[in-house]
């Protein structure tokens, strides 16, 4: 008779008594797993070192073409050009000026900093100022339009052609009418789309798409033909071929039936989520914020006012909801007083905006300001009291301001230290014909307000063409 | 009639006793026996002295050639009497040829019956077999081959016993009139050992003498020198010396008219023979062929001297001798026989391997078989195999799912997107790219084409030039292709069974679940397909052979097989590295680890080059096989060239890998085109659990070492911002291997143990492991291939531009894209960018001039810049949407550009007014490329030959 086999439990007990010798292979295996875990953890921590992004190179400007557009309405106009008094700037080069489409004439040689008067453009025409080599460096050209029979003055900087323009605050009603002037200065034809946005969205219009401008052609488009009976409009000009210079002449009467004031609506380069609007004239009966939202979704816009000590939210208009494609108008009311100030907008969608300041007989438009990353200049027309209004960036900044006579002699200078989002004024001494603002630290935005005899106007400061950002160009395989 | 036997010996003590016995037992004894010993170091001299007496022995230095020895012997004979009725014969014997007792008698009988015959030769039979025929008279073919008219190893059954005139007879047993020897000056001293008998016979024939073979006389011959059994100072390499003698004999004896033709024919024939010998893996014989040719041709003075000497003795025209030479068609018949023999051998070998596999499988199916079943014939029909064979079923499902998964990628056009460029119109583009030293694309480039274009071009040629089909097959059938390799590898490693099938499917799904297919990662997809074959070949590199997990498999690998495996591994690793160069770096590390472990375990065994040599060859040969790319790219980019895989970098699809990405094997950024992470986690758990099983632990540990090295490589590549597809796939493959190895026989193992913690834990691990392929299959079939890979037209610019660029390579198309404030440009020529063009793209430095012009145009455009653009061979400028408005404005405003048609919404195009030219483009310069290509070609041929099955060399 055979002996019965032990049961499972007995076998297990026996097995447990016989302790297995330590298996070195098992230890190696455990070590390998541990190293694998470490590697996996390392993978989570190690991050690819990004290659340093190539920075666009700054190259000195050696050619400039700017266009001054004649106001559609009759009046007196003047235009001045100058090469800004920049330290260590080279000499040489040529400057020519003349009506667009005609052979330009040389402009007499003038030392750097001296204003040179050129023939202003007639109504419905344009004048192109071209400078090459060192004369192009810091070249600024300005035009001043004075209404016939009144003290109203409007001024703007003559701008180079480009493909995209935005104007907000235009109108096509009884007391508010605007005219768009398009100029093609290039040797090839330009094809332009003009899209108007009204309070109810994009305005359906005929004949505003694919507008072809011959080389040298100046065409004026009355917005009454594009969007009749629309008091508040935003206009988007997009060249699908070529480049144009666009200017929007506005005629606005604050009170029904009153004589309208003439003004150039400042252009905006492109729609943006963050906008700084300014400068605001200190004396105005009414201030109206006009915001256009070309996006296909609602834009939630936060409004803040840049006062002398920083930004604050105005009562009642702290937040706006702009419907998709529409233009929204808001009365800023008493949110802005007589102190120098600007408006800061932050939006959930890219928008275009302006603040219209109006008083009896005149109106002024505070458009989007560009950061002054180079010297900027503005004309101080005679008969007006000009004041420079500068706003600090999100981290503040400082700027040096110099005022010059028309002969290029410095007559005054100063420096403004600007707290974050604060707007401060600086008034030049009498005898100053233009000012040059140079950012010393941080980010600075600003413009010049011109007031006198009830007239309101302002001009935004734009960096003069000193350096161009040459884009990073990379050969790729795609 | 007198006969003098002249025996020439050199270290022939092995055979001499029998030879001397044969000589002494002749029924017609020679009148005199003389022996010339050429410096024997063995007992030859003693044997000769004791048998023949010291007075019959003539000593000579060791370097004495056979013609010199014969001449020396003749010089010791008394002067010829010159009596016409008393001919003096000399019977030449070697120390390795034993005459039959009546050999001399038969020869003399024939000589008496044929008084006009001057030279007679016996029938030579092989010694020691004694029955096989060696020679019954000899002649020479037009290629210099020694023709006997016999089959190899033919038994002597009297079938060739016909006394007849021949061109020559072997000097072993040759009976020759002494005056003929004197008249012709004996044997040619330029033929020291081989072929002098043929030459002598030919000369004799030209001198009007008859040579006759006498089959009744038999001599047994060892052919010691010819077979390489005996090496003397004058034999050298016997194959080389024999071939050299044959070439010399042909060239000095042929007619003057035939000489030029023969000179060319012998060169071409020798090269062809050398190539053929290489292909049958006989590199030394191939080398002998070439060296013999060179040695003969570099000394034309010898040929001239030989011909002059023969002209002096010649009395009949070459035409009268021609009938004694082999027919002209004979070499071609030999060639045909060679090819057919080779084909038959290959077919037989394949059949043997196949039947061995079937036998192995049949042996595994043990147990009683019903009697009826024994009588049934095996049903080999497709349906029956699908039903009865799980493997066939799995592959059928995989192929079916491949079609389902690729449903969004079927149709017309080219596969492209992500990292994949569209395939060229035909494979000839790949050949051109590979062989050209200068590429016209862009501004021109001398960069070497990536090595993966060579296999693509080869496969493309097999696909009748349809390059797109190569890409389609690789991407759309990547799963079954990868599974095929995995199936083969796992069969070698663990044998057939369910773990093998699991591993096959789990690995096969890697191209799709990792997102490699979805992202168009050609390198990773091809690497997944090739990797198992590399691993399979590498299994045989170990001296012990593949790990003995499958009892049915043969044991340790033979030395020859290891070396063949080394070359096979080198070839496959080169193929793998061509698509994923980082594979070679990983292989270097793994080879180092393997050799290091081998040395640690058995230092003495691994000290031998036979142990580490195959491993070193497997990895060391790869850079040579990847020439010219490996050298030229390395000198240009250093080690960086080995990081990027085949295809575009597609950096926007690469992101930092996290813990879970690596754990689940998902190298794709944000899982683009890849399966969800949870599908792959089970494999990691199962691979860790595989370490628990003791008896499979060595193999599992080896797999884990591979996992670690691969993970480390992935982390390093990730840190450099480079796509880490291959290392991740390698880690996954090693994990699959570990699990499959540990799962072999797991069911029996677990069920045979007492119930405890092992069963539930094992069940969980098995379920987790099963989830990997099953969930992967479901995901793949459900979603199909996702990611940027798409099918569409290959043209990136308007068709009229492509047409113009195809008509004139100067009409390039400059494509400028705007992205994040940067301008990205490509200068297209011809068809535009196709797969492979990216590998020869010009460097940024070479394009600096063009880059500056585009920068100027985007900043301050002028007509001069447009003119400069035309000097770069640019006819069109094309801006695809979204365009940069500033650049558009600049290009619209500048003179020299006219607006051209661009149909795609948002795009813009211009045509240059100036006629494009190439004046600003760099000129091609001298390059090492062609020479490196030659080296690569030679290396590839050598590697293929050395990887092929060994040929038994027969003499």
Image: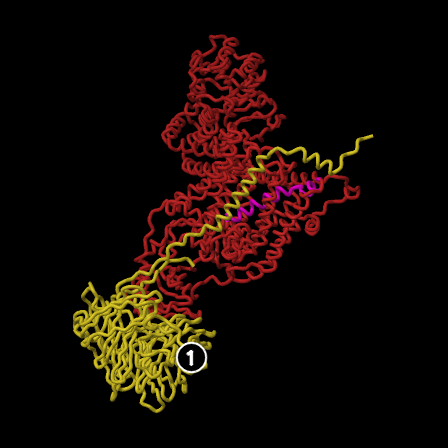
Asked if residue B751 is among those painted magenta in the image, a careful observer would answer yes
Residues B657 and B69: in front is: B657
Chain letter for mark 1? A
* Residue B126 image point, x, y percent: 57, 23
Residue A27, compared with residue B99, is above or below; it is below
Q: What residue span does the magenta drawing correspond to? A: B726-753
Residues A17 and B448: in front is: A17
Tell me where residue B898 sits by quadrant.
Answer: bottom left
Asked if residue A16 is among those painted magenta in the image, a careful observer would answer no
Residues A415 and A405: in front is: A415
- Note whether residue A271 is visible: yes
Magenta highlight: main SS = helix
Q: Which residue does the numbered mark 1 point to in the structure image? A: A327
At 44% from the left and 30% from the top, the residue drawn is B244
Residue B866, compared with residue B289, is above or below; it is below
Say left or right for B265 vs B344: left
At 54% from the left and 24% from the top, the residue drawn is B213
Task: Estimate how packed mark 1 is, as few (under 14), some (14 to 19) or many (20 or more) residues with alpha carbons within 10 Å.
Answer: many
Residue at the extreme bottom = A257
The colour one sees for chain B in the rendered image is red
Tell me where residue B702 sits by quadrant.
Answer: top right
Question: What colouring method underlies this structural image?
Answer: by chain
* Residue B934 image point, x, y percent: 42, 42
Say left or right for B358 vs B808: right
Residue B713, compared with residue A192, is above or below; it is above
Specify the quadrant that holds the C terminus of chain A: bottom left
Q: Judging from the image, what is the letter of the chain drawn in yellow?
A: A
């Amino acid at each position: 008779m055979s002996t019965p086999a032990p049961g499972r439990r007995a076998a297990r007990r026996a097995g447990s008594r016989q302790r297995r010798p330590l298996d070195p292979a098992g230890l190696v295996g455990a070590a390998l797993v541990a190293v694998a875990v470490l590697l996996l953890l390392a993978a989570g921590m190690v991050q690819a070192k990004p290659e340093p992004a190539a920075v666009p190179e700054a190259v000195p400007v050696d050619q400039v073409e700017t266009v001054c557009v004649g106001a559609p309405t009759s009046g007196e106009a003047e235009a001045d050009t100058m090469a800004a008094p920049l330290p260590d700037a080279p000499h040489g080069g040529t400057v020519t000026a003349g009506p667009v489409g005609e052979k330009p004439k040389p402009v007499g040689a003038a030392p750097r900093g001296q204003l040179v008067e050129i023939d202003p453009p007639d109504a419905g025409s344009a004048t192109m100022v071209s400078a090459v080599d060192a004369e192009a460096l810091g070249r600024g050209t300005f035009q001043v339009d004075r209404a016939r029979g009144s003290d109203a003055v409007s001024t703007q900087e003559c701008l180079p052609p480009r493909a995209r323009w935005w104007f907000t605050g235009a109108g096509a009603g009884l007391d508010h009418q605007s005219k768009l002037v398009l100029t093609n200065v290039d040797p090839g034809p330009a094809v332009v789309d003009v899209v108007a946005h009204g309070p109810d969205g994009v305005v359906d219009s005929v004949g505003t798409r694919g507008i072809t401008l011959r080389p040298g052609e100046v065409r004026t488009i009355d917005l009454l033909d594009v969007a009749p009976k629309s008091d508040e409009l935003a206009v988007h000009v997009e060249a699908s071929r070529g480049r144009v210079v666009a200017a929007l002449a506005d005629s606005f009467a604050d009170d029904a039936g009153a004589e309208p004031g003439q003004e150039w609506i400042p252009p905006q380069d492109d729609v943006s989520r963050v906008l700084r609007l300014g400068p605001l004239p200190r004396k105005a009966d009414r201030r109206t914020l006009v915001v256009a939202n070309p996006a296909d979704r609602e834009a939630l816009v936060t409004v803040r006012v840049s006062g002398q000590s920083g930004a604050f939210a105005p009562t009642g208009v702290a937040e706006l909801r702009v419907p998709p494609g529409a233009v929204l108008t808001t009365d800023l009311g008493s949110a802005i007083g007589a102190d120098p100030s600007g408006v800061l907008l932050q939006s959930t969608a890219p928008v275009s905006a302006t603040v219209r300041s109006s008083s009896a007989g005149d109106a002024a438009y505070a458009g989007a300001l560009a950061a002054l990353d180079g010297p900027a200049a503005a004309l101080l027309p005679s008969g007006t009291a000009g004041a420079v209004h500068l706003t600090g960036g999100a981290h503040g900044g400082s700027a040096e301001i110099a005022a010059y006579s028309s002969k290029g002699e410095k007559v005054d200078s100063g420096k403004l230290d600007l707290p974050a989002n604060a707007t401060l004024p600086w008034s030049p001494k009498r005898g100053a014909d233009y000012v040059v603002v140079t950012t010393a630290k941080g980010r600075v935005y600003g413009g010049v307000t011109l007031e006198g005899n009830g007239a309101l106007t302002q001009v935004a400061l734009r960096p003069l063409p000193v350096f161009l950002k040459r884009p990073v160009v990379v050969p790729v395989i795609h | 009639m007198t006969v003098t036997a002249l025996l020439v010996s050199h270290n022939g003590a092995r055979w001499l006793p029998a030879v001397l016995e044969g000589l002494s037992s002749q029924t017609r004894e020679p009148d005199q026996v003389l022996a010339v010993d050429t410096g024997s170091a063995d007992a030859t001299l003693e044997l000769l002295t004791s048998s023949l007496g010291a007075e019959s022995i003539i000593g000579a230095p060791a370097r004495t050639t056979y013609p010199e020895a014969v001449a020396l012997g003749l010089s010791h004979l008394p002067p010829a009497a010159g009596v016409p009725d008393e001919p003096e014969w000399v019977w030449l014997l070697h120390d390795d040829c034993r005459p039959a007792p009546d050999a001399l008698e038969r020869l003399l009988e024939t000589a008496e019956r044929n008084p006009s015959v001057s030279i007679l030769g016996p029938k030579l039979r092989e010694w020691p077999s004694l029955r096989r025929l060696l020679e019954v008279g000899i002649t020479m073919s037009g290629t210099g081959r020694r023709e006997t008219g016999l089959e190899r190893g033919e038994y002597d059954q009297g079938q060739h016993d016909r006394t007849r005139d021949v061109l020559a007879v072997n000097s072993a047993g040759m009976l020759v009139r002494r005056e003929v020897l004197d008249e012709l000056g004996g044997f040619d001293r330029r033929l020291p050992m081989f072929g002098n008998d043929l030459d002598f016979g030919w000369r004799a024939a030209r001198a009007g003498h008859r040579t006759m073979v006498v089959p009744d006389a038999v001599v047994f011959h060892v052919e010691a020198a010819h077979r390489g059994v005996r090496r003397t100072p004058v034999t050298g390499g016997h194959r080389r010396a024999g071939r050299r003698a044959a070439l010399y004999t042909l060239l000095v004896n042929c007619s003057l008219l035939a000489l030029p033709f023969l000179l060319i024919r012998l060169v071409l024939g020798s090269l062809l023979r050398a190539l053929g010998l290489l292909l049958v893996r006989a590199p030394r014989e191939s080398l002998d062929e070439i060296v013999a040719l060179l040695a003969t041709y570099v000394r034309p003075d010898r040929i001239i001297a030989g011909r002059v000497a023969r002209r002096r003795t010649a009395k009949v025209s070459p035409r009268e001798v021609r009938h004694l030479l082999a027919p002209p068609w004979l070499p071609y018949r030999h060639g045909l026989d060679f090819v057919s023999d080779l084909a038959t051998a290959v077919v037989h070998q394949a059949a043997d391997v196949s039947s061995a596999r079937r036998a192995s499988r049949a042996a595994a199916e043990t147990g009683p078989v019903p009697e009826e079943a024994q009588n049934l014939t095996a049903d080999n029909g497709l349906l029956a195999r699908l039903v009865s064979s799980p493997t066939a079923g799995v592959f059928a499902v995989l192929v079916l799912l491949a079609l389902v998964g690729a449903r969004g990628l079927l149709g017309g056009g080219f596969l492209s997107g992500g990292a994949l460029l569209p395939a060229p119109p035909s494979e000839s583009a790949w050949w051109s790219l590979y062989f050209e030293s200068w590429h016209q694309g862009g501004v021109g480039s001398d960069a070497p084409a990536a090595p993966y274009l060579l296999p693509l071009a080869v496969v493309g040629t097999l696909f009748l030039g349809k390059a797109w089909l190569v890409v389609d097959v690789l991407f759309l059938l990547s799963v079954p292709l990868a599974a095929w390799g995995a199936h083969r590898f796992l069969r070698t490693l663990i044998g057939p069974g369910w773990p093998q099938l699991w591993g096959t499917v789990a690995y096969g799904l890697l191209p799709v679940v990792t997102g490699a297919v979805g992202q168009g990662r050609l390198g990773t997809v091809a690497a997944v397909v090739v990797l198992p074959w590399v691993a399979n070949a590498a299994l045989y590199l170990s001296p012990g052979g593949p790990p003995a997990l499958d009892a049915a498999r043969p044991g340790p690998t033979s030395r020859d097989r290891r070396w063949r495996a080394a070359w096979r591994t080198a070839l496959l690793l080169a193929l793998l590295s061509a698509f994923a160069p980082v594979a070679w770096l990983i292989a270097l590390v793994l080879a180092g680890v393997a050799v290091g472990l081998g040395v640690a375990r058995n230092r003495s065994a691994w000290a031998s080059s036979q142990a580490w040599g195959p491993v070193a060859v497997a990895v060391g040969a790869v850079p040579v096989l990847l020439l010219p790319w490996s050298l030229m790219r390395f000198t240009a980019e250093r080690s960086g060239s080995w990081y990027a895989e085949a295809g575009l970098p597609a950096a926007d699809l690469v992101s930092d890998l996290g813990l879970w990405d690596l754990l689940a094997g998902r190298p794709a950024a944000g899982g683009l085109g890849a399966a969800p992470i949870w599908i792959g986690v089970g494999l990691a758990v199962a691979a860790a659990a595989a370490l628990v099983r003791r008896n499979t632990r060595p193999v599992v540990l080896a797999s884990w070492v591979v996992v670690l090295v691969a993970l480390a490589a992935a982390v390093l590549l990730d840190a450099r911002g480079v796509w880490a597809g291959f290392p991740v796939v390698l880690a996954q493959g090693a994990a699959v291997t570990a699990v499959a190895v540990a799962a072999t026989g797991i069911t029996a193992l677990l069920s045979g143990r007492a119930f405890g913690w092992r069963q539930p834990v094992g069940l969980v691990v098995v379920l987790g492991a099963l989830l990997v392929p099953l969930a992967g299959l479901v995901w793949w079939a459900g979603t199909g291939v996702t990611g940027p890979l798409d099918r569409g037209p290959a043209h990136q610019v308007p068709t009229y531009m492509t047409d113009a660029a195809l008509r004139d390579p100067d009409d390039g198309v400059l494509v400028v894209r705007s992205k994040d404030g940067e301008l990205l440009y490509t200068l297209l020529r011809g068809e535009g960018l196709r797969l492979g063009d990216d590998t020869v793209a010009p460097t940024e430095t070479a394009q600096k001039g063009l880059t500056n012009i585009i920068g100027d145009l985007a900043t301050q455009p002028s007509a001069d810049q447009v003119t400069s653009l035309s000097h770069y061979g640019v006819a069109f400028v094309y801006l695809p949407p979204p365009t940069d408005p500033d650049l558009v404005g600049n290009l619209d405003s500048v003179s020299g550009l006219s607006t051209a048609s661009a149909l795609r919404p948002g795009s813009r195009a211009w045509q240059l007014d100036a006629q494009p030219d190439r004046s600003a483009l760099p000129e091609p310069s001298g390059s090492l490329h062609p020479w490196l290509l030659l080296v690569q070609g030679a290396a590839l041929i050598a590697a293929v030959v050395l990887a092929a099955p060994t040929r038994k060399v027969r003499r």
